[in-house]
Amino acid sequence: MTTGVEFLPCIVAFCCVHSAYQAADAAGRMRIPYPENIIMVHIPCAGRVDTLHILRAFENGADGVVILACHEGACHHILGNIRAKERVERANALLREIGVDGRRVEMRTCAPNDGSRFARVCHELEEKIKELGPSPLRKHA
Amino acid sequence: MIIAERKPLEDIKQMIAQYKKILLVGCGTCVTVCWAGGEKEVGILASQLRLAFRRDGGELETLEATVERQCEKEMVEELKDKIQQVEAVLSLGCGAGVQTIADRFEETPVYPALNTKFVGMPEREGLWIENCGACGDCFLDRTGGICPIVRCAKGLLNGPCGGTNKGKCEVDPEKDCAWTLIYRRLEKQGRLDLMRKYYPPRNFQAVVRPGKIEAQRV
Ligand code: SF4
Ligand code: SF4
């Protein structure tokens, strides 16, 4: 960035209560730091996330969105993570249609006790969104 | 039911480029079932358009509504208050829905967000297949309930043609040959004699445009 001000991306993370949300807790208990600019949204299952929720996050200023779900085959509600994956793909396609890099939305998985993975994923996401820069969809971009 | 799909976003954006505030109207019947124009799609398209306008440095305000059947005058009546607040309407109904709103609210421009494609059925989740061309002179009694008018690439009344290939159509090998399907169906029913009959060209006067049907009260 040329402005000299460090870009702190706003990342919305939809966290499944059966996996990532618990993993975030685990990270906390283990004193593993993760970026503070990750806004966690507590969801009952990744399958609860709708394409519209993803778009609304961008309308409200997100630079990136991630759905953090159970590993494949481990969804508490059987198909929730598969559905979430499809919606991430759909949201990516909708964003690409308006000329926005689809990499701003992604789906990642995490086990409930894996605090270190949770923290690592958050750092990776932050790095990626930093590289992409602020979202062109921000109100005063 | 009627199957439709959303127009390319670029086309929709161009149609409404001049407006600052529009109403998006979905339909709760056919186009809800084929994922093209129900309440959910209205929400997604509205959000996507707001983002697209913002991306281009502008701003779009949207109102949303979904009526149960957009092709009925009485049902679009409920849009009145919302239509008074906007410059234009973007309809996610089939062509009949768009026209019903346009007729009822003549002073407001109404734009189609969908392309109405055909009369069809769901084959599996997310896949719809055309199976009736509304030809006005139904032929299904002779074909075991499989329509050769739209499901045969050539619309043959006396099939199959010489190109049928192991149950697939020569025009598009991905598709089943309608006449092979018809043969198999009639075979199951012991009605293969129908395959030996010759059917003369159809009476195209059966379809007069625009169609009009007046039913008698029961
Ligand atoms: S013959 Fe085919 S196109 Fe004509 S009414 Fe019957 S199903 Fe529809
Ligand atoms: S192969 Fe079958 S479906 Fe295709 S054009 Fe010939 S008769 Fe019709």
Image (spheres, grey):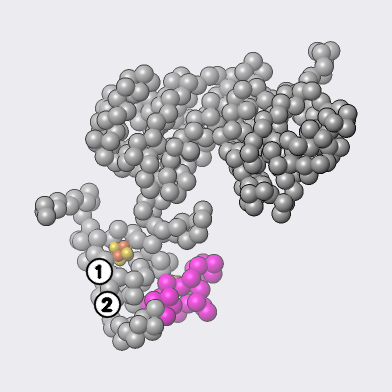
Q: Chain of mark 1?
A: B
For the residue labelled by badge 2, is the local secondary structure a helix, a strand or a loop? loop
Q: Amino acid at mark 2?
A: Tyr
Mark 1 near mark 2, Cβ–Cβ under 8 Å?
A: yes
Label 1: how many Cα within 10 Å (few below 14, some 14–19, many 20+): few
Left or right, B66 with reference to B40: left
Quadrant of the image where one finds ligand 2: bottom left
Q: Amino acid at mark 1?
A: Arg
For the residue labelled by badge 1, is the local secondary structure a helix, a strand or a loop? loop
Is the CB atom of the residue marked by disc 2 within 8 angstroms of ligand 1's nearest atom? Answer: no
Report the magenta residues as a range.
B159-184
Front one among B52 and A7: A7
Seen at 39% across and 31% down, the residue is B65
Q: Is residue B132 above or below residue B141?
A: above
Quadrant where the C terminus of chain B is found in the figure: bottom left
Seen at 34% across and 42% down, the residue is B95
The residue singled out by tag 1 in the image is: B202
